[in-house]
Amino acid sequence: MQVQSMHFKQTASTKLNDAVLQKALKKSKSKFVDGRALGVAEVDNWEDIRTYAAALRDRVIDNLDAYLIEFERNAIRRGAQVHWAETAEEANAIVLGIAQKNAVKTITKSKSMVTEEIALNGTLIGAGIRVMETDLGEYILQLADEAPSHIVAPAVHKSKEQVAELFMNAHHKPRLTDIPSMTREAREQLRSHFLGADMGISGANFIVAETGTTLTVTNEGNADLVTTLPRIHCVVTGIEKVIPTMEDFATLIRLLPRSAIGQSIVNYLTLTTGVKAPDESDGPEQMHIVLVDAGRTKLVGSDMKDMLRCIRCGACMNHCPVYQNVGGHAYGWVYPGPMGSVLTPTYVGIENAGDLPNAATFCGECQVVCPVKIPLPDLMRKWRERQFDMKLRPFGERAAISLWGFFVQRPRLYALATRIGARVASMMGGEQKLIHSLPGIDGWTQGRDMPAPAGETFRELYAAKSAAKQVAR
Amino acid sequence: MKVGLFITCLVDLVRPNIGFAALKLLEDAGCEVIVPASQTCCGQPGYNSGARDIAKTLAKKVLAEFKDCDYVVAPSGSCSGQMKLHVVEDLFKGEPEEAEFRALAAKWYELSDFLVNVLKSEKLAGKFKGTVTYHDSCAGLRELGIKTQPRALLETSGCTLNEMQDAEKCCGFGGTFSIKLGEISTRMAENKCVNIGVAGADAVVGGDLGCLLNIEGRLRRNGDMKTKVYHFAEVVAGMTE
Amino acid sequence: MSARENILARIRGQTGKSGATSEGELAAVHAHIARHLRGPLPSFAMHDPQEHFVKECGRLSTTLTEVADLADVPREVARYIAAQSLQPRCVGWQEFSTLDWQSAGIQFDNRATKPDDMIGLTGCFCAIGETGTLLLLGASARPKTTALLPETHICIVKKSRIVPTMEDAFALMRNEIGEPPRATFFVSGPSRTADIEQTIVIGAHGPYRVHVILVP
């Protein structure tokens, strides 16, 4: 996916004034936030499970090489072919190579954020292969030629009227008005694609070292069809997705759907291990697993390694007040919200995503809801530290911090400066004691008044009072 | 009991009344209050802007100013979170000063927490006859668990609480965020003001001046000159005028 | 150097480990896996599994009936089919082909599922009380598509095979058949989507209806 994260501020501004989007965000917020709260409330030892899950993810990330080798060994033993890709380009070339070698004409896909990262569809379509997204949300976006705006609910920004329009034009059928009919029509349209595809591409929510199994989690059942019907199944996934055992999956699946949408379980947990037996009537003849790095090893062992625990539930964005107001597209790449503000600079470079770690008030909601306890505000702050050290923020901002730093470390000078500042600003406030505009902080005063200072600082008033007391004694 | 009063940089500069309200509450409860004259800031603005070294220098300065007190109290959840949490868990973690900062953190309290859980104050000067709605500031709420303490104090001083919807949602202040990403910050403040309006209280009360300035700034820009905006210390100390 | 070697070397470098992954490190991984450690369980996972299964099926929109004997299944299927106004024809797993379908008036076919089959009948390896989930293990005589392509999925569940948790299901699988077969899948109610305006619609790409028949 093409990176647009450098335009965060401008895009966010547009999105704040997009009425359709604002309506969609309000609606989804209540579903996601209230849904999660209800789902989590059912689990009396939620915190214990979180702690356990964070530790099990850490164990893998700290020994990632050994767990990947074990996964690979078992996957090959069960008949899969395992490929490794250092970059997005390599991953795309591997998948395209598999398709071309097997004369693949049509591909069905179930939702995969890694394939969004590497922009796989573009590569395949460019080579003349027909690619159909089958997750309903992804299908809608494919028709609209748009990127997902959310990692769990990709088309959350679209209204049903917009979807109806897209379906009418793409399906050449009368315009529908209700959501169940639209869903049914999409099902009918996609059925023939499922049945006729030469190759199915899925992501993986987890890959299990113990058995060489890849695992997908869906409500629609599309991943089951994608991994079962075509003669070739190709899994594209990140190297950090490995977990040791099936028991670990059982733990994580208690957290994932509840965190995402408040469901106790998703409708389909699809475990695929190897290829079909000669006497089986369904299942792929070839299974390929592409393990993608594309920036992940930069996080391994680093001060941001906690990010690799992420299980892609979307709770951090659902609860983020910034995301709730600007939506996912403003973030300009695959991963919106707090997790994106950590991952995007890592994967596409901080120079292309400088506003993202700053697009947070550090309110801490993301960290509280994260099922694997990723300290997202701390990780965003680490990016801010790197930006400061590398002098990547605008000059005015850096100068302001340096100037502030100079004064606060010198109490006498600071006292003098604040006495003058308090008086000047107090006068600017006038009778209403409100400053309507102030150069340098126009980011504030464009939408808000600045309540004016009282005129004298606490420290000078306190000193005067203390002196008066001394005299009185 | 020697209690150090940490005056936040915003209180010092913009609304000294909050500092005097905190002072009164502590003195009324019989504390010997120390107010170091050299204090400036806890360092959080630098810390959250990536200027780690400045934040560390300021933390050391705060330590030197307050280490001899039995307790340190601040009328802010945000500065308290900086000194109780970030300084020990991040800035000085594994460094020689860690133990000293841990000792400081252990005796550092946010004002409402100190009044309720240490002093167990029951007689308060405030007599606010009216309805208030309380905004939970993020750092106090999520880093320190400040939730029931200020409400208990407000009720003791005669306030009727009208809870607003999403009281725990960020108001959009976020320090420099409010300037760097002013448009988003303003929208978040607007959402807060809508909920305040629906709650229909005489005053909106909070525990961090940053949030209060943000909320007040948006209320006034919207033409609401009526809804009062107070720090809980002002209400509870009877210093709202 | 291959991509594989580069990636593994980078991981080693980043975690401060020298050389290639050692036999000792791999042995530690094997040992950890072999323990099959279980995480903490919420207290409802310890409830009576059969009772909880029934309750959870209700939440998932899975319908459920109980019969006294496996031989009663065709009659129950006939009742269900009539109630849903469906055609009395189903495709199903081999193990159920010996039941007396004819006297229940149902045409039962044991074959690969075709796209226009409307009802699929399967058994399950076991079911999970905690979440109302069915665990199906695909095999030549038990094709996965039977549970997936038709609009209605009827699943026969032996009550004695309802285990409390997913961990228990995996343990049972290990004991009885060893490794997970190629197609191992957990079904929890009819397929659904909420991709248009977060409105839940039953029947996305999988079945519209899941009906469980409990047998002794």
Image (cartoon, coloured by chain):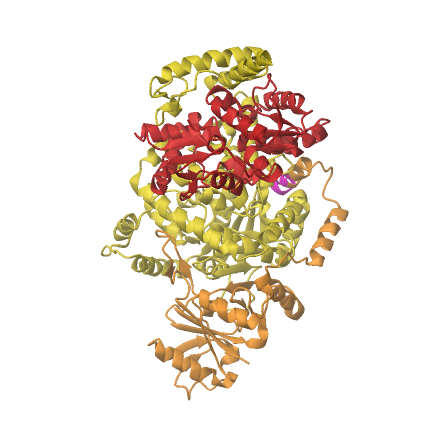
Chain colours: A yellow, B red, C orange
Q: Residue furthest bottom?
A: C103
Q: Position of residue C64 (x, y in %)?
A: 46, 74
Q: Is residue C6 magenta?
A: yes
Front residue of this view, candidates C72 and A265: A265
Q: Residue at x 71, y 28 (%)?
A: B100
Front residue of this view, candidates A154 and A281: A154
Q: Position of residue C110 (x, y in %)?
A: 47, 77
Q: What type of secondary structure mainly makes up the magenta span?
A: helix
Segment colored magenta: C1-7
Q: Is residue A266 above or below residue B117?
A: below
- Can residue A404 be seen? yes
Q: Quadrant of the N terminus of chain B?
A: top right
Q: Position of residue C5 (x, y in %)?
A: 65, 41
Q: Residue at x 45, y 65 (%)?
A: C59
Q: Position of residue A164 (x, y in %)?
A: 27, 52
Front residue of this view, candidates A304 and A138: A304
Q: Quadrant of the C terminus of chain B?
A: top left
